[in-house]
Image: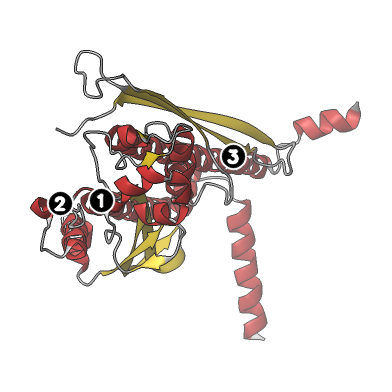
């Protein structure tokens, strides 16, 4: 017991101990702020990507009637993933999952009372590293989900 | 001899200063911390300037991509056969956006590079050399043949700005920082009406009488 009591009563170097604790907390806050910034930036990119894809579907959806899978594979997925990869915080090679549901009114394509519509859902899984813990065990997978929907525009 | 005495005197004074616990302890601590605080404050201001220029660049690139997406001379319709240089107009938008930022204006010569890439990531001269009329024909005939075509439908505008002032962050010199931004969009051909359909081609029936397909 005596060494513990002596250590507790010893006031020498208390400022150093205090400074070390503050520096560690400051570094942790700095690291976490950086992570939050990355997450917000990726979320913003996903939103921009989904918006672009939704704009394409709105304008061209009727043209691709019957070829929904091709529309998704050839245009929407590359568009979304390219926009995501423009963000340097997005790990290279990681991709978003896109689902598209086209509801085309028949036989009148441009029925104002019952318009053709679409729903686009983009999901992206981001492995967020936890500071101080490396490897797969040290990461938490964040799932971002962005949804857009609307009418399929009909040129007149 | 006098040198040794002077050294001993100096050492004694220094020891006294170290062991002295009287006086304004907080003031000394503050004076020691002040340079660090000033460095952090200056670094924050530098960071704010860079963030401001980055934000402007982001908006400018988006505007240029949006412009090229919506306005281009390849609608395939004579009515829309525009004669202006689309790229020039888009790059003017970038410059005008950047020059609306006070930090860029006061900095003087800013170097801006704008490049365009197709869907396959290859650099292209102009992203809008694309025939919308052909898109309709391709999709309606056989969308399976579209991969190469769709590479030209999607494009990316990427910009780099080298800031003329030398930045430093928390005392670390960063030199002339280059910021970049990119946006991906598509050549806007729609909306379509009526749904584009290929010309019906007669196909033989078992009885030999032709009927319209599609």
**CA distance separating discs 2 and 1:** 8 Å
**Which chain is indicated by disc 1?**
B
Residue B197's disc number? none
* Residue A80 sits above or below residue B31 on the image: above
Residue B133's disc number? 1
**CA distance separating discs 3 and 2:** 59 Å
Disc 2 designates what residue?
Answer: B77
Same chain check for tags 2 and 1: yes
**CA distance separating discs 1 and 3:** 56 Å
Mark 3 residue element: helix
Q: Pointers 2 and 1 in contact (CB under 8 A)?
A: yes
- Name the residue located 44 percent from the left edge and 52 percent from the top edge: B31
Q: Quadrant of the C terminus of chain B?
A: top left
Q: Residues within 10 Å of mark 1 (few under 14, many from 20)?
A: some
* Residue A104 sits above or below residue B146 on the image: above
> Closest to the observer: A80 or A75?
A75
């Amino acid at each position: 017991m005596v060494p513990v009591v002596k250590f507790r009563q010893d006031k020498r170097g208390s400022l150093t101990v205090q400074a070390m604790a503050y520096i560690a907390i400051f570094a942790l806050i700095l690291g976490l702020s950086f992570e939050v910034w990355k997450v917000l930036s990726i979320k913003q990119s996903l939103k921009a990507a989904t918006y672009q894809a939704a704009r394409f579907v709105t304008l061209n959806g009727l043209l691709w009637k019957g070829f929904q899978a091709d529309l998704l594979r050839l245009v929407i997925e590359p568009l979304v993933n390219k926009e995501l990869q423009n963000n340097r915080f997005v790990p290279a090679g990681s991709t978003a999952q896109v689902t598209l549901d086209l509801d085309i009114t028949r036989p009148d394509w441009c029925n104002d009372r019952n318009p053709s519509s679409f729903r686009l859902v983009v999901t992206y899984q981001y492995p967020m590293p936890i500071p101080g813990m490396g490897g797969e065990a040290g990461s938490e997978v964040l799932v971002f989900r962005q949804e857009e929907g609307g009418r399929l525009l009909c040129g007149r | 001899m006098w040198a040794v005495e002077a050294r001993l005197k100096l050492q004694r004074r220094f020891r006294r200063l170290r062991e002295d616990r009287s006086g304004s302890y907080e003031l000394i601590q503050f004076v020691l911390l002040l340079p660090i605080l000033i460095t952090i404050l200056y670094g924050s201001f530098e960071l704010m300037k860079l963030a401001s220029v980055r934000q402007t660049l982001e908006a400018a690139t988006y505007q240029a991509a949006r412009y090229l997406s919506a306005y281009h001379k390849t609608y395939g319709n004579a009515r829309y056969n525009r004669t202006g240089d689309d790229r020039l107009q888009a790059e003017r938008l970038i410059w005008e956006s950047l020059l609306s930022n006070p930090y860029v204006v006061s900095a003087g010569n800013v170097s801006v590079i704008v490049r365009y890439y197709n869907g396959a990531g290859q650099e292209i001269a102009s992203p809008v050399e694309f025939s919308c009329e052909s898109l309709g024909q391709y999709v309606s005939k056989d969308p399976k043949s579209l991969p190469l075509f769709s590479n030209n439908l999607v494009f990316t505008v990427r910009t780099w700005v080298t800031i003329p002032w030398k930045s430093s962050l928390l005392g670390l010199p960063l030199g002339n920082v280059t910021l970049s931004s990119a946006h991906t969009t598509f050549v806007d051909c729609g909306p379509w009406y009526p749904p584009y359909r290929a010309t019906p081609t007669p196909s033989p029936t078992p009885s030999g009488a032709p009927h319209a397909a599609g």
